[in-house]
Amino acid sequence: MYDLEATAGLVEMFRSEKTTSVLNSIRIPGIPKCDGGLSITGDSMYSLLKSGDIVLYKEIPVEQQSIFFGEMYLLGVRVDEWKEMITVKYVQKSDKGEEYVRLYERSKGAV
């Protein structure tokens, strides 16, 4: 379980010494292996996920063939040189072409 506020975002957390932001360990028998967990902040995916809920994640390459479209992903989106937006959204194919994806909140529509 990682403390995302103790890092400079997802990209930095994945690249750096991960032990600096570890809060605790969680063991849940019978689930697939994952790379970590985070506590959700905000309610953009309410009522499915609420602020304070824990999500478990598995790192994948940022490549079209690695994405399971229609599934939910924890995403770190670089806003500018200093800021990263971290969000949980469904990912779908985009009408704009192969190099784009569509982020989706099931109850609210595209974002």
Image (spheres, rainbow, N blue to C red):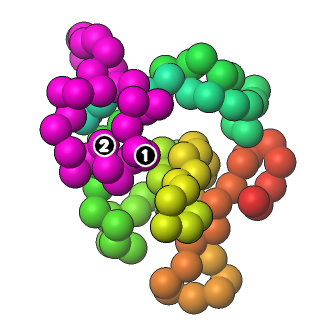
Amino acid identity at mark 1: Gly
Q: According to the image, label 1 marks what residue?
A: 9
Position in image of residue 60 (x %, y %): 29, 55
Q: According to the image, label 2 marks what residue?
A: 13
Quarter of the image with the N terminus is top left
Q: Foreground residue, 101 or 39?
A: 39
Crowding around mark 1 (Cα neighbors within 10 Å: few <14, some 14 to 19, many 20+) is: some
Position in image of residue 89 (x %, y %): 60, 48
Q: Is residue 63 magenta?
A: no
| Residue 88 as seen in the image, left or right of residue 13 | right
Residue under the point 73% across and 46% down = 106
Q: Foreground residue, 20 or 42?
A: 20
The kind of secondary structure element at disc 2 is helix
The magenta region covers 1-30
Q: Are marks 2 and 1 in contact (CB under 8 Å)?
A: yes
Amino acid identity at mark 2: Met
Residue under the point 40% across and 45% down = 8
Quarter of the image with the C terminus is bottom right
Residue under the point 34% across and 72% down = 63
The kind of secondary structure element at disc 1 is loop
Indicate whether 63 appears above or below 50. below
Q: Is residue 15 magenta?
A: yes
